[in-house]
């Protein structure tokens, strides 16, 4: 959210003819975009790091129990989604596994190859 001073500067910059005000408003906006991108990049990196350490989460269908009880509470059946384990692979771990597969499938640039 822009402050009132920045909004006034931005309004002056877009409607006025002062080139320094335009430059100031552009630098201010670029700084905000850079800050947001830095925060988002840090959050994504932290999430991927946690997915490396803890690759599994609780199954959403059975809430991590791995089974469903009957209405009377004596019998149960295994969850079909997690096959009774109560775990699921987190989205970030899927991304990491895909990146590893793509990197492993590529050819090394220093190898001689089949020429």
Image (tube, helix red, strand yellow):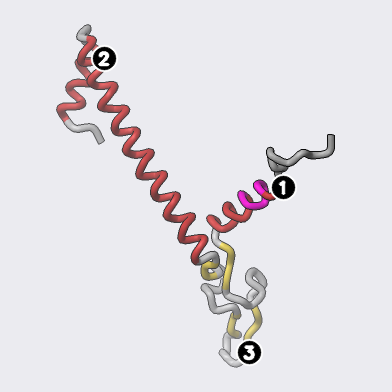
* N-terminal-most mark, 2 or 1: 2
Q: Neighbour class for label 2 at 10 Å: few (<14), some, many (≥20)? A: some
Dot 1 lies on which element? helix
What segment is highlighted magenta in the picture?
Answer: 99-103
Give the CA distance from mark 2 to mark 3. Answer: 70 Å
User: Looking at this rendering, what residue extends furthest in the right direction?
Assistant: 115
Is 84 or 27 nearer to us in this picture? 27
- The residue where tag 1 is placed is 105
Residue in the image at 57% along x and 75% along y: 86
Q: Dot 3 corresponds to which residue?
A: 75
Residue assigned mark 2: 14
User: Which circle marks residue 33 in the picture?
Assistant: none
User: Does 102 appear in magenta?
Assistant: yes
The answer to which of 28 and 17 lies nearer the viewer is 28
Q: Nearer the viewer, residue 110 or 40?
A: 110
Q: Position of residue 32 (x, y in %)?
A: 29, 33
CA distance for labels 2 and 1: 51 Å
User: Of circles 2 and 1, which is in front?
Assistant: 1
In-image side of 63 versus 4 (left or right): right
Distance from label 3 to label 1 (Cα)? 47 Å
Total marks shown come to: 3
**Residue 85: % across, % down:** 61, 76
Badge 2 marks a residue whose secondary structure is helix
Which of marks 1 and 3 precedes in the sequence?
A: 3
Q: Earlier in the sequence, mark 2 or mark 3?
A: 2
Q: Position of residue 63 (x, y in %)?
A: 52, 73
């Amino acid at each position: 959210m822009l402050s009132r001073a920045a909004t006034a500067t931005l309004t002056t910059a877009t409607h006025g003819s002062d080139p320094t005000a335009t430059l100031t408003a552009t630098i201010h906006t670029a700084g905000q975009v850079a800050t947001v991108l830095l925060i988002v990049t840090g959050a994504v990196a932290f999430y991927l790091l946690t997915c490396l350490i803890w690759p599994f989460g609780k199954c959403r269908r059975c809430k991590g129990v791995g089974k469903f009880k009957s209405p009377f509470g004596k019998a149960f059946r295994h969850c079909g989604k997690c096959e009774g384990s109560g775990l699921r692979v987190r989205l970030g771990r899927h991304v990491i596994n895909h990146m590893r597969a793509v990197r492993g499938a590529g050819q090394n640039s220093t190898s001689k190859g089949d020429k």
